[in-house]
Image (tube, helix red, strand yellow):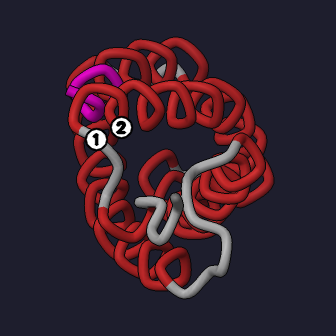
């Protein structure tokens, strides 16, 4: 669901901003989404290992912000070169385009993970243990 919305948002924006065909923009959006899915698995595995070792358990706003910044920051580093190559543009242009997506997805990722945790519960790494 998360990535379907990403593709639906990103493809038309890329098409409009870079004057790309719908097919090219949709293809790029699917590639970016696939990369994001892989990064999501890797980042969340590492984050939850780190989180499990913390003395304070649970997911505070500060921890959610750290998660969002870490995830989106890593994603920018990975996606900018891909966008630049696909769109035949400079890294700077791809970075600027990615900043707009970053602003949207930073807020969206935090809200989505909060809602996900509410519906499905926290992972074991974030559960509060030993409280009376």
112 relative to 55 in the view: left or right = left
Marker count (numbered): 2
Q: Mark 2 touching mark 1, by CB under 8 A?
A: yes
12 relative to 121 in the view: left or right = right
Along the line of sight, which residue is nearer the eye, 129 or 10? 129
> What's the CA distance linking mark 2 and mark 1?
5 Å
Q: Which mark is residue 110?
A: none
Q: Residue at x 52, y 62 (%)?
A: 131
Q: Label 2 neighbourhood size at 10 Å, few (<14), some (14-19), many (20+)?
A: few
Location of mark 2 (residue):
117
Location of mark 1 (residue):
121
Position above or below: 53 against 112: below
64 relative to 44 in the view: left or right = right
Task: Identify the magenta region.
Answer: 1-6
Q: Quadrant of the N terminus?
A: top left
Q: Residue at x 61, y 32 (%)?
A: 101
Along the line of sight, which residue is nearer the eye, 49 or 91? 49
Q: Residue at x 24, y 53 (%)?
A: 34
Q: Residue at x 25, y 26 (%)?
A: 119
User: Residue 97's x, y, as percent?
Assistant: 68, 36
Report if residue 39 lies within the magenta region: no
The secondary structure that dominates the magenta segment is helix
Q: Quadrant of residue 98?
A: top right
Numbered disc 1: secondary structure: loop
């Amino acid at each position: 669901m998360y990535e379907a919305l990403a593709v639906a948002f990103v493809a038309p924006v890329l098409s409009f901003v870079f004057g790309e065909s719908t097919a090219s923009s949709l293809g790029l959006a699917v590639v970016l989404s696939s990369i994001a899915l892989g990064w999501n698995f890797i980042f969340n595995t590492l984050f939850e290992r780190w989180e499990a070792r913390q003395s304070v358990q649970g997911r505070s706003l500060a921890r959610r912000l750290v998660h969002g910044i870490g995830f989106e920051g890593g994603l920018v580093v990975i996606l900018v070169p891909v966008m630049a190559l696909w769109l035949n543009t400079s890294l700077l242009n791809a970075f600027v385009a990615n900043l707009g997506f970053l602003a949207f997805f930073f807020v969206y990722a935090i809200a989505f993970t909060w809602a996900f945790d509410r519906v499905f519960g926290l992972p074991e790494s974030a559960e509060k243990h030993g409280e009376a």
